[in-house]
Image: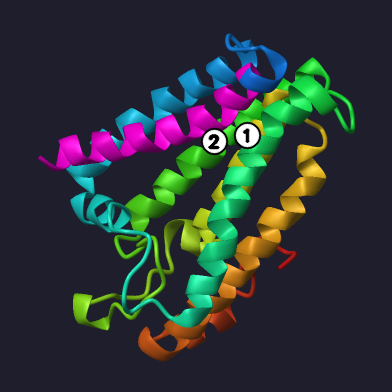
Amino acid sequence: MLVLRGLVGALFQWLVIAAFLILPAGIFAGEWAWARGWQYLAVYAALLFPAATAMAVFAPASLESRLRAPASAEQPRDDKIASAILFPALLLYMLFLPLDALVWQLLGVPPLWLSIAGLAVSAVAYLFVIWTLFTNSFAIPVVEDQSEAGQVLIDTGPYALVRHPMYLGMVCMFAGMGLWLGSMASLPLLLILVGAFALRIRAEEKTLLTTLPGYREYRERRRYRLFPFIW
């Protein structure tokens, strides 16, 4: 049953991304068969559905956490504000990609080698996100006190690199996506996503400092929130 729920959740995620890439390409550029878009979706599906299945089998608690609703009554006000900014920012970023790649080309088109590198980075970054989820079964979609659920501090695996590795993986995944799809302007636009993630990190750490034993000491050991050696 959990495998089926995971696959249904993965399908919903894939359909959302497909809609934000292919519909604008078709409506505004007449490119319903946009090769780069469909190729990216094929690669993403080849990673997404096996990952969902593997999580259901080998890390069911992690999958259960990710299948939770992206809002809750216990969600602090700071995270509600951050989520209200972050989720639309992610969707608008994806909407921008086909429009810029096929219509605007604000900063030109990346060379083929850079596009291929972008696809590779996006795939590896997605696997990094999955590694994070396997490592931390408390990575729910919202910020809330999980003391009653027995939340423990995770400081191994990707958490030995930065304090918020899933967000690092997502930023890199979207950066690579933009390059593969053909938008150089997507790179400076990433600053908006980074800012939205920074708001989410601020809300998350505020809660973790008061509810998760050992987090304050972990924050001192792992100085970098999102980008190694930068911030």
Boundaries of the magenta span: 1-26
Out of 188 and 129, give the one closest to the viewer. 188
Residue 141 pos. (x, y %):
39, 60
Magenta stretch, main secondary structure, is: helix
- From what the image shows, is residue 77 above or below residue 167? below
25 vs 70, left or right, is right
Secondary structure state at the residue bearing disc 1:
helix
State yes or no: discs 2 and 1 in contact (Cβ < 8 Å): yes
Which residue is drawn at the image coordinates 79% and 23% (left, top)? 103
Q: Is residue 23 magenta?
A: yes
Residue 124, numbered label: 2
Looking at the image, which residue sits at the far right? 107
- From what the image shows, is residue 86 above or below residue 116? below
Residue 18 pos. (x, y %):
49, 27
Q: Tag 2: Cα neighbours inside 10 Å, few (<14), some, or many (≥20)?
A: some
Which residue is drawn at the image coordinates 40% and 66% (left, top)? 142
- Quadrant in the rendering for residue 150: bottom left
Q: Amino acid at mark 2?
A: Val
Which residue is drawn at the image coordinates 9% and 40% (left, top)? 1
Q: Which quarter of the rendering shows the C terminus?
A: bottom right
- Quadrant in the rendering for residue 96: top right
Out of 110 and 86, give the one closest to the viewer. 86
Q: Amino acid at mark 1?
A: Val
Residue 3 pos. (x, y %):
17, 37
Distance from the alpha carbon under mark 2 to that under mark 1: 5 Å
- From what the image shows, is residue 180 above or below residue 223? above
Residue that badge 1 annotates: 121
